[in-house]
Image (cartoon, coloured by chain):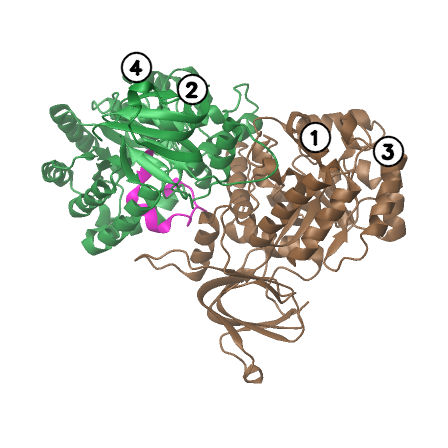
Chain colours: A green, B brown
Amino acid sequence: MRQGRLAVKGNICYSTSIKDIAALEGGYLLAEDGRVTGVYARLPEAWSGVPVEDYGDCLVIPGMTDLHLHAPQFPFRGLGTDLELLDWLNTYTFPEEEKYRDTEYAGQVYAAFADALKASPTTRAVIFGTLHVPATRILMEKMEETGLISYVGKVNMDRNSPDGLREGTRQSLTDTEAWLRETAGFRRTRPILTPRFTPSCSDGLMAGLGEIKKTRGLPVQSHLGENPSEVAWVRELCPWARNYAETYDHFGLLDERTIMAHCVYLNDEEIGLLKARRSFIAHCPQSNMNLASGVAPIRKYLDEGLNVGLGTDLAAGADLSLFRAVTDAVGVSKLRWRLLQEEARPLTFAEAFCMATAGGGKYFGNVGSFLPGCEADILVLPEQRSGPRRESLPERLEQTLCLAGEDVHLTAKYVAGEKLFGPGD
Amino acid sequence: MRQGRLAVKGNICYSTSIKDIAALEGGYLLAEDGRVTGVYARLPEAWSGVPVEDYGDCLVIPGMTDLHLHAPQFPFRGLGTDLELLDWLNTYTFPEEEKYRDTEYAGQVYAAFADALKASPTTRAVIFGTLHVPATRILMEKMEETGLISYVGKVNMDRNSPDGLREGTRQSLTDTEAWLRETAGFRRTRPILTPRFTPSCSDGLMAGLGEIKKTRGLPVQSHLGENPSEVAWVRELCPWARNYAETYDHFGLLDERTIMAHCVYLNDEEIGLLKARRSFIAHCPQSNMNLASGVAPIRKYLDEGLNVGLGTDLAAGADLSLFRAVTDAVGVSKLRWRLLQEEARPLTFAEAFCMATAGGGKYFGNVGSFLPGCEADILVLPEQRSGPRRESLPERLEQTLCLAGEDVHLTAKYVAGEKLFGPGD
């Protein structure tokens, strides 16, 4: 966190609720000790003398939170998405993840991954590694260097995985404990328990992870209800469970510090359970399209008051940029509405923008907006277009996010008030 | 067309059929008088002495054809796609298109549009203007300067349009004749008859355009079966027609030089009619998602042997890049398969790549591949990534197209053997 005062000037846009985006042209965003104190049309007198970082006509928006992505899959993003989930895991993902027993390979990929994430619109991220402790430690070191704030998980998997990527149950738990001891010292990079998903984790492993969670008070990330074949498989694997969500909840793995990725296929009981536990849903629209998983009923989850953020799900989602996740979330919701002929209306741009910023940011505390008290995660977007048509500020925001590809060139980026990069770097 | 011999060296990928992509690392693509003579692993002896344009490790692929886009909508791409087609037209499109009575406004926008299209993966395009003759002439001048080969249409619309954007029937036909006389002199930019769509065109206007088509042997572009409300409206407007497609065919407007955009909702009769007429379908996946139109059954059209290419449909499609159209075509086909629980399998990357190159290219003749005899439209893509994972050439192609956003930076571009730009420009 940055100590002292920070004043940023520009065209400021941020969500004040799931439906509303506040916009102020040439406004001042003020922060003290890493937290927003307010947004003002003029610099308050008490701040005169504080140097203003003036970004002219640039857009200034909150940083975004990526609630779900797999760092070791960085090398093959944009590839192999002709398959569905389970075949894709066996054909592309598992063979790639086995390579991370090699710390040199891990170091090369994770350095490139961390650089790309630093340059992206993401200021906070919740990341899967592999099951390898040394490689996961390297990933955490690289993430720590970026200045981003993240959770990183050593993956646990003790069944239904290839030989080179399967732990013994006890070994998985012992390795997890060792990894937790070894990686306690990072400032911005925290560990998160990461049972891959129920098909990869025996009941014994889940029980052991539940114990570790309880003892150490750790957060958890996993996958839930991504694909019909996966859901059917879980039913076979856990005949004792009423539903997929219960295969986590039974072991104490669902609470308000838990993120479940996808949630395309949840029944009403599962929705009620996630609501009661106040767990987070990581909606990954590009991934769900690429792997033909379907479209999650996000309108329903929002109406139910569930916690929903966005994830890129690298590399089933090809793009590392959450800007793409925002527009994809809107797009696939329209196809769900049209193809399933549902009454639930599609998502709006404002709703998707809020999920990418404040929705996922909530997992990290008071993050993702510029309301007073929020941690000052700030993106400064370059002025991109010029032309005779004049757009309003909210229109510029929508257009900029929609047209920015993977190749986003941010003008500046701050995390909790600390400047990661800016003009002249 | 470029006279003489051209030799380009690089990693060459091109479709040899709808299913197959040929790939040759460090190959030679040879062309003579603007047409490909072949692709070779070594430079043939007869070509020794011909200077080779060596692009090292770059990908070399055929140019792409955008079968459907609206130049005057360039300023508001990425905006206002919270609406369905008919509301979107009235709220965003028509008010913007009215501005093109102002030739200064048209000049500014069309210059920016032409520059962007020149830099994009598109080498051939079929473009809607507005109903204004002077503005459409300006658009043709700007397109001619790019070196791209295109069809450009002055739009016809005499009903169900706002006052400032509605012609009298006779005036529309007279203006069309005047526009055709005025714009006969371009070398690369040809006129195409452009009834906007049936709701905007009275039977009398359609009949008049049919006459002009017959007399002058002109091609035609329009819209067909984009949205359920539009289809229902056409049924009301033309009670005499068996279906939407017949509202064009009845006036002689469907033949092998006709492009119909969208075709999301066609019945079997209409599919049979398009097949009999050998007309082209412009599949616009991003547009159909943005406007909640749906997903066109492209698998069915391919199985039926219809002519299908891709369109960006700027600005209902936000991205000007056909790379995005390729990945979107695959993505939305997966959601159609999953959500409608159809047996028809989703599109593959190879199929979508072929539609973007050879599929749309066929409208321009022998265009869109590197098989002998094809016109030498060539894109050279920069080497984008480096990392420890080694991809095959087809994998690199898929990954590059998937990860390239709007901000595509081509290394070089050729149209019919003529170099539009390259290194050092």
Instruction: Residue B353: give x, y in percent of width and height.
Output: 55, 53
Q: Which residue is mark 3?
A: B203
Q: Which residue is mark 2?
A: A18
Q: Nearer the viewer, mark 3 or mark 2?
A: 2
Q: Residue at x 23, y 37 (%)?
A: A152
Q: Secondary structure at mark 3?
A: helix
Q: Secondary structure at mark 4?
A: helix
Location of residue B148 (image quadrant)? bottom right
| Tags 2 and 4 both on a single chain | yes
Q: Which residues are magenta?
A: A66-86
Give the residue type that dot 3 points to.
Answer: Asp
Location of residue B165 (image quadrant)? top right
Residue A407 versus residue A327 in the image, above or below: below
Q: Nearer the viewer, mark 2 or mark 4?
A: 2
Whole-angstrom CA distance, mark 2 to mark 4, is: 21 Å
Q: Secondary structure at mark 2?
A: loop
Q: Secondary structure at mark 1?
A: helix
Mark found first going from the N terminus, 2 or 4: 2
Q: Badge 4, how many Cα within 10 Å: few under 14, some, many 20+?
A: few
Q: Nearer the viewer, mark 3 or mark 1?
A: 1
Give the residue type that dot 4 points to.
Answer: Ala
Q: Which mark is residue B94?
A: 1
Task: From the viewer's side, name the closer residue of B148 and B38.
Answer: B148
Give the residue type that dot 2 points to.
Answer: Ile
For this view, does B18 lie left or right of residue A312?
A: right
Task: From the viewer's side, name the closer residue of B163 and A75.
Answer: B163
